[in-house]
């Protein structure tokens, strides 16, 4: 084992990343030049920095911490945040294609970036004071500072309004008590965007800094999914949060839910990357693997699987392109984003399972990325709103009847 800036290097796979993108309907013609440049830059970075090491980190259930800096360098943190705050100043389509390429590498790597962007930088930019924006956003954009998002609690996941984490006013501060669960990045985060109920029962947002007395973030172990992503809790025991760290004007669930819509939008794009990687591997394997005297791609059932895969990927690509177009105009509704997240993650998981069958026994080994994507997607289909919850969001939107009550 050799050392690299204090990070032990894992053994790299000997072969290069052979991934080739798939664009059956020439959707690239609908993208602008800066979208393609951003996507290709991230794709190259993934091939050079992620693919060679990700299987080893996944197997050891370790987070590749050194990639945080690289994500900042390629502009994956806050690509749609204005340049004056350290962001990329790009549009929502650029954010989408970046998330797609990162998840092609690994869902955990995309999570590192989408949490930083959608759940930390976005609420600070949208709801924070000018002082908060200047203090946090430039450092978050470079990866000098890492953030996390505290909404989900041990007993309140799909029902965030039932949260028990609370704040009480105390002079020039609020006293924060409670706990959050399943928090990406929390054990390594420098700050946490936390949502809690005030004494009137209104949900408030704030920035809690690492090192504040009574604040801890223990890591969650034993995950069989997103193993290269670090996940933990947030525990608050009489944490004194200065009033200057509070978001001044946002009250209620509208604040955290707007952040979740931003994150779900990124997932809708990202899941396509995982699906494309599984399809690309399966297509290549079907040409190389021979049975009964010819490549298995000659057989009708293999062609059926591959044809259905590229069809579903193409439909998902068209969906997120349209969603990105709406988002750029500020017209993408939360329900539309929910539909895309639900559809595309389910699509990606189905493709991963079909790709595993094409690979046969080799599909369960880490020689190929299939099982890693499949295991990751079992989390992605649940977090940021479960598969069933998103179904009910669509049901509510089309019928007007609220099945949550």
Image (cartoon, rainbow, N blue to C red):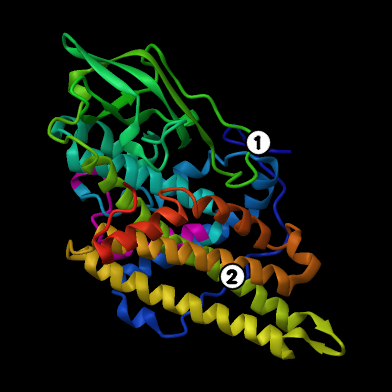
User: Residue 306 placed where, x, y %?
Assistant: 61, 81
Label 2 belongs to which residue? Answer: 351
User: Residue 155 placed where, x, y %?
Assistant: 45, 31
Label 1 belongs to which residue? Answer: 222
Residue at 70% x, 90% y: name it.
300
Magenta part, dominant SS? helix
**Count the marks: how many?**
2
Whole-Å distance between the Cαs marked 2 and 1? 26 Å
Residue 172 lies in quadrant: top left
What kind of element bears circle 1? loop
| 60 displayed left or right of 175 | right
User: Residue 277 placed where, x, y %?
Assistant: 58, 68
What kind of element bears circle 2? helix
| 112 displayed left or right of 249 | right
Residue at 31% x, 75% y: name it.
31
162 or 165, which is in the foreground? 162
The stretch in magenta equals 84-103
């Amino acid at each position: 084992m050799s050392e690299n800036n204090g990070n032990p290097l894992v053994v790299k796979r000997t072969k290069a990343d052979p991934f080739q993108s798939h664009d059956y309907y020439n959707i690239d013609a609908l993208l602008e030049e800066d979208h393609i440049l951003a996507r290709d830059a991230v794709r190259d970075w993934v091939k050079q920095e992620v693919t060679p090491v990700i299987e080893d980190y996944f197997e050891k259930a370790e987070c590749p911490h050194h990639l945080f800096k690289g994500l900042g360098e390629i502009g994956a943190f806050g690509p749609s945040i204005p340049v004056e705050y350290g962001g990329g100043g790009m549009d929502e389509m650029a954010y989408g294609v970046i998330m797609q390429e990162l998840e092609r590498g690994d869902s955990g790597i995309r999570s590192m970036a989408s949490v930083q962007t959608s759940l930390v930088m976005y609420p600070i930019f949208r709801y924070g004071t000018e002082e908060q924006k200047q203090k946090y956003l430039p450092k978050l954009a470079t990866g000098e500072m890492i953030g996390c998002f505290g909404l989900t609690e041990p007993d309140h996941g799909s029902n965030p309004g039932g949260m028990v984490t609370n704040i009480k006013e105390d002079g020039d501060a609020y006293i924060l008590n409670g706990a959050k669960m399943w928090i990406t990045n929390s054990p390594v985060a420098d700050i946490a965007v936390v949502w809690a109920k005030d004494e009137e029962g209104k949900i408030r947002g704030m920035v809690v800094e690492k090192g504040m007395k009574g604040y801890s973030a223990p890591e969650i172990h034993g995950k069989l999914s997103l193993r290269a992503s670090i996940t933990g809790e947030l525990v608050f025991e009489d944490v004194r949060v200065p009033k200057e760290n509070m978001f001044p004007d946002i009250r209620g669930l509208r604040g955290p839910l707007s952040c979740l819509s931003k994150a779900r939008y990124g997932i809708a794009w990202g899941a396509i990357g995982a699906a494309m990687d599984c399809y690309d591997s399966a297509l290549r394997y079907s040409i190389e693997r021979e049975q009964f005297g010819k490549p298995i791609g000659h057989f009708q059932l293999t062609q059926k699987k591959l044809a259905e895969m590229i069809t579903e990927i193409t439909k998902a690509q068209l969906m997120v392109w349209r969603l990105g177009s709406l988002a750029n105009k500020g017209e993408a509704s939360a329900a539309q984003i929910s539909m895309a997240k639900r559809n595309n993650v389910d699509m990606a998981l189905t493709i991963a399972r079909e790709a595993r069958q094409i690979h046969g026994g080799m599909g369960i080994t880490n020689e190929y990325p299939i099982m890693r994507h499949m295991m990751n997607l079992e989390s992605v289909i649940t977090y940021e709103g479960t598969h069933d919850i998103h179904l009910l969001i669509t049901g509510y939107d089309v019928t007007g009847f609220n099945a949550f009550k």
